[in-house]
Image (spheres, rainbow, N blue to C red):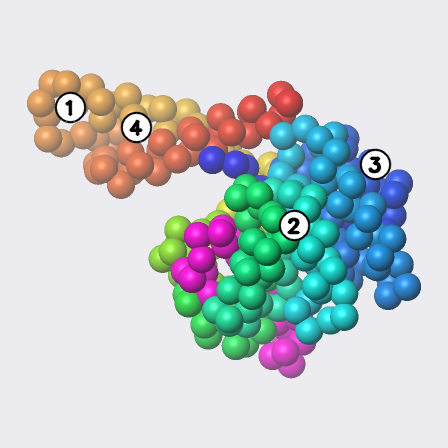
């Protein structure tokens, strides 16, 4: 298990930001060649980002590179360079179909990308929401869905409001698709950097809904996001108690297990083991 509580976009054109990222508490970084880079800086940013991704200077953090979209003039050169750099993942905006995923797969393979370079598909349009299961399940190389909530709101003619009611249908469809196909899914960004209360509320909503983590746009969002999406001390203690009680019952041949008055079944034990695995993965990342 790799923790992906906090996944921070970093502007590919900003050499200082890429250097600063080496010391941040992000579980993963997306080095961005798309929105954060002006057209006349795309080629230089591509070289800088690919060099950073292959430098080995980011510890155990997962390093992904976001390419420009399939319909842009920079896309083919981005994918070719990223394939050679061999980061943990390539992030592709506005994936709308299985055909799009297949095209990325083919480009990575022809470019000599190592097997470890996975595809993270950004789903951010109504058509992507309606075909999320097909997209998520069409490739073993595709391992992560990334919600593009800003573009989704734009496409829906919706407003950004607390609780995100206009986006919940799309978020839910993608969550179902991710869980049905065994993929990781990351919540979208929160735009109001100075609104700490609103940001925390959206992180908590994302965790309750079932997201594995959240994409971020500013380092100030890292620590609160990490805290929300990590198992709490109480959750870890409860997980250990559940596993211990279940294993003792199995040894004694008891068919009924209760912990603190609650009946425990196999599904609760599976959830407890997942909680402990997540906590251990986070601890390993923090020690790196």
**Mark pair 1, 2: CA separation:** 49 Å
- Tell me, for residue 83, which label it has, or none: 2
Q: Say what secondary structure mark 4 lies in.
A: helix
- Tell me, for residue 113, which label it has, or none: none
Residue 186 against residue 268 in the figure, above or below: below
Question: Depth-wise, is mark 3 or mark 1 nearer the camera?
Answer: 3
Dot 2, crowdedness within 10 Å: few (<14), some or many (≥20)?
A: many
Q: Of label 4 and label 1, which has the lower sequence position?
A: 4
> 30 or 218, which is in the foreground?
30
Q: Quadrant of residue 178?
A: bottom left
Dot 3, crowdedness within 10 Å: few (<14), some or many (≥20)?
A: few
Q: Say what secondary structure mark 2 lies in.
A: helix
The x, y position of residue 79, in whole percent, is 68, 57
Q: Is 23 placed left or right of 93 in the picture?
A: right
Q: Which residue is mark 1?
A: 250
The residue located at (38%, 56%) in the rendering is 181
| Residue 113 visible in image | yes
Residue 174 against residue 214 in the figure, above or below: below
- Tell me, for residue 19, which label it has, or none: 3
Q: Which residue is mark 4?
A: 242
What is the span of residues highlighted in magenta in the rendered image? 135-162
The x, y position of residue 160, in whole percent, is 66, 69
The residue located at (87%, 53%) in the rendering is 44
């Amino acid at each position: 298990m790799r923790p992906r509580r906090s996944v921070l976009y970093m502007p590919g054109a900003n050499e200082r930001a890429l250097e600063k990222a080496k010391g941040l508490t992000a579980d993963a970084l997306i080095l961005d060649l798309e929105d954060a880079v002006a057209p006349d800086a795309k080629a230089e940013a591509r070289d800088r980002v690919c060099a950073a991704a292959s430098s080995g200077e980011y510890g155990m953090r997962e390093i992904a590179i976001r390419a420009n979209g399939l319909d842009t003039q920079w896309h083919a050169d981005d994918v070719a360079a990223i394939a050679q750099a061999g980061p943990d993942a390539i992030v592709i905006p506005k994936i709308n179909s299985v055909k799009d995923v297949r095209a990325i797969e083919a480009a990575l393979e022809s470019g000599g990308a190592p097997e470890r370079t996975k595809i993270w598909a950004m789903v951010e349009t109504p058509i992507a929401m309606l075909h999320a299961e097909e997209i998520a399940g069409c490739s073993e190389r595709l391992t992560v869905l990334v919600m593009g909530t800003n573009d989704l709101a734009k496409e829906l003619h919706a407003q950004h409001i607390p609780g995100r009611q206009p986006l919940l249908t799309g978020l839910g469809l993608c969550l179902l698709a991710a869980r049905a196909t065994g993929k990781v899914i990351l919540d979208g960004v929160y735009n109001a950097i100075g609104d700490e209360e609103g940001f925390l509320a959206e992180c908590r909503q994302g965790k309750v809904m079932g997201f594995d983590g959240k994409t971020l746009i500013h380092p100030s969002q890292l620590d609160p996001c990490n805290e929300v999406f990590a198992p709490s001390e109480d959750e870890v203690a409860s997980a250990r108690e559940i596993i211990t009680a279940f294993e003792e019952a199995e040894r004694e041949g008891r068919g009924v297990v209760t912990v603190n008055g609650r009946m425990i079944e196999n599904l609760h034990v599976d959830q407890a083991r997942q909680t402990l695995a997540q906590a251990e993965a986070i601890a390993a990342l923090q020690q790196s």
